[in-house]
Amino acid sequence: MHYQHINTIVANHDAELSAAEAHGMAAGMLCVNGRTELRFWLQELLKDADAINDEDRSILENLFEDTRSLLASDEFVFGLLLPDDDYPLGEQVEALRKWCQGFLFGLGSTSSTSGSTPNWSEEIREVVKDITEFTKLDTEPEDEEAENDFMELTEYLRAAVIFLRAELNSADNRTVH
């Protein structure tokens, strides 16, 4: 999915979020519950999910379902929806911060619908803490290594999300939302 296209759809429907946040939210929800329904995500994402036109709904549905299948894949093919490399690094870092915020929201909103406080392992809590720290990244990278650091963070997040999905998406977390 093309970042800018999704960003435009989300903005046009007054979601007050970016494409990165929307994708992060979907990934967080699906990490907790791989059977999370599209309508649950759309209700959390958009102020008026019913007002979305069929074409935009289809594109968002494809994003959500692609995210579901990539997370479920054994091929380690999941990726974050972020601006392309031709965007300024500061914008990419800002999108990464927002992706993490969306992810944490999706994780929390889906965990809270189960009605009980999550009993997460120390490893899960540590990864969630790391992702929380990424929401505080400086969006004005100053040194020459900033691009490499950014790439390392995105790779860490890819692996962290796949780890969280494997750990959190167990049989006792499969209630449908």
Image (cartoon, helix red, strand yellow):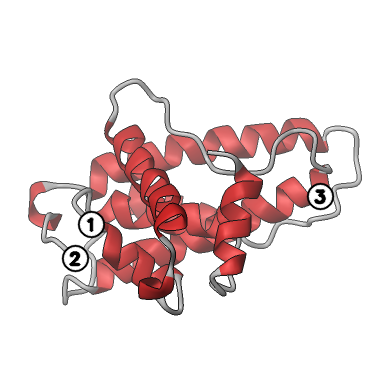
Q: What is the C-alpha distance between the residues marked 1 and 3?
A: 32 Å
Q: Amino acid at mark 2?
A: His
The quadrant of the picture occupied by the C terminus is bottom left
Q: Position of residue 48 (x, y in %)?
A: 42, 78
Residue position marked by numbered label 3 in the rendering: 90
Residue position marked by numbered label 1 in the rendering: 36
Circles 1 and 2, Cβ within 8 Å, touching? The answer is: yes
Q: Position of residue 34 (x, y in %)?
A: 22, 48
Q: Amino acid at mark 1?
A: Thr
The answer to whether residue 162 is visible is yes
Element carrying mark 3: helix
Q: Residue at x 43, y 59 (%)?
A: 25
Q: Which label sits on residue 177?
A: 2
Q: Earlier in the sequence, mark 1 or mark 3?
A: 1
- Considering only vertical position in the picture, is 145 above or below 47? above
Q: What is the C-alpha distance between the residues marked 1 and 2?
A: 5 Å
Element carrying mark 2: loop
Dot 2 alpha-carbon crowd within 10 angstroms: few under 14, some 14 to 19, many 20 or more: some
Nearer to us of marks 2 and 3 is 2
Q: Earlier in the sequence, mark 2 or mark 3?
A: 3
Q: Earlier in the sequence, mark 1 or mark 2?
A: 1
